[in-house]
Amino acid sequence: MSLFGSLFHDTESKQEVKNVLDLVTYTASLASNPTEVDSLIDQVRKVTATHAAQNTLSPAEEATLIHVYLGLERYLTTRDPIRTYTKDELRGRLNPDLLTKLTQQEAKGDA
Amino acid sequence: MQKYKNILMGSVVVGLLAAAAMFVIPIPESWDFSTFEFYWPLASNALMACLHLGAVILFVLSLTVYKAKLRLAFTGIVLGIIFTALGTIQLPIIDALDLWGSPYVTTGIIGVPFLLAGFVIYLGASSFGHLVGDKSWLGRKWLIIPGGLVVGALLGTFLPHIPLPTKESDFDIAMSINFWMVALEFAATAIIFRIKQRMGAHYSKAVLYLGLALFTGTTAVLVATIDTFVSPNAHGPLMSAVNVLAIFAGWFWLTAGFAFARTKEY
């Protein structure tokens, strides 16, 4: 898509997030200074590097990615230098299943 | 989203109507150049001013979600857009009314909006860069502002030019200030492109348009300055190119404002 054509194009930002990998990727893109979340993104890279041949994420991989998401969420709601997001804003696009998994892991103390 | 789209499209439509309206202005009897040379700068600058105005509205609307330091940086950039538009739009008016010999022009006040634009845009871009962790030398105000002045003074004073009716010292000072402003704005452009490399993908498009707007606008001022050295009047092909560049700059400012307003959504 051209530079001008892409101007009005609705990005994936409007869609409901169903996959935890998409969630983490998109949330990481909101960081105004991504170098500050690099250590978290490294954990995503490790998961994607070993996961490529499989179709679904294992529970352990999903737990790692949710852990990364919670770290990104904490960064965006407290430390991002240009903008303050709220948890509710960030979680507004999650589908119910994903939101349940997230709150369950958060309740276990992963925040 | 729809509101921002309406502002963007509205700015373009109003700009085109304003440009068309310029053609009803009667050509003064004292006008020595072609009809095209009278109407083209007026029409293109009317369009350019509307695009800049739309950009200002969009940038201001996008400010609400950002933290105070970024709002301050953006305020500098928005003021820069306003000063650039004011500085550019005065030129065809001065030309049409043949005010080039007036004190407003000969004392250099005409260049003040451009100088202010250079300053506030550079300060805004520099602050923006610091916020997202860009620590390059381009953001060092103590280096770039005096350094730009030295470069501007050297170019303005020593570049050869055609014979002019004004005093040599007045011309040198005016051109030095112009080159100084250009240096500051090119530094700001470089900072913005560095920011684009650093920032998250969510902001990528907005920062790209911001960089393109700065680059195109600054190039327009640079070409206009060069034209002053080589052309006896403001009606040569270079100035026509400047008007085209100014329209593109206005469009890029508008799209940058639109893209930043859209970053509110996710």
Image: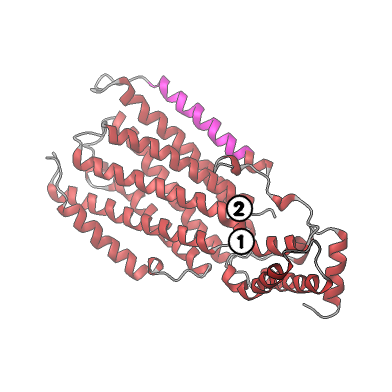
Quick check: B250 above or below A88? above
Q: Which chain carries label 1?
A: B
Where is residue B87? Give x, y as percent: 36, 44
Mark 2, secondary structure of its residue: helix
The crowding category of the residue bearing disc 2, from other C-alpha atoms within 10 Å (few below 14, some 14 to 19, many at least 20), is: many
Q: What x and y, as percent, mark residue B54?
A: 54, 41
Q: Main secondary structure of the magenta part?
A: helix
Tag 1 secondary structure: loop
Q: Is B13 included in the stretch rendered in magenta?
A: yes
Q: Are marks 1 and 2 in contact (CB under 8 Å)?
A: yes
Instruction: Tell me where residue B191 appears, x and y as whole percent.
Output: 43, 61
Disc 2 chain ID: B
Q: Is residue B238 magenta?
A: no
Q: Residue at x 32, y 54 (%)?
A: B181
Left or right for B254, reference A17:
left
The disc placed on residue B66 is 1
Q: What residue type is labelled 2?
A: Ser
Q: Which corner quadrant of the image does residue B102 belong to? A: top left
Q: Residue B62 carries which label?
A: 2
Q: Residue at x 29, y 66 (%)?
A: B146
Three-letter amino acid code at the position of disc 1: Tyr
The N terminus of chain B appears in which quarter of the rendering?
A: top right
Which residue is nearer to you in this view: B167 or B159? B159
Taking the image as drawn, is residue B124 in sight?
Answer: no
Q: Residue at x 31, y 26 (%)?
A: B37
Q: What stretch is highlighted in magenta?
A: B6-25
Q: Which residue is drawn at 80% across and 73% down?
A: A63
Colour scheme of the rendered structure: secondary structure
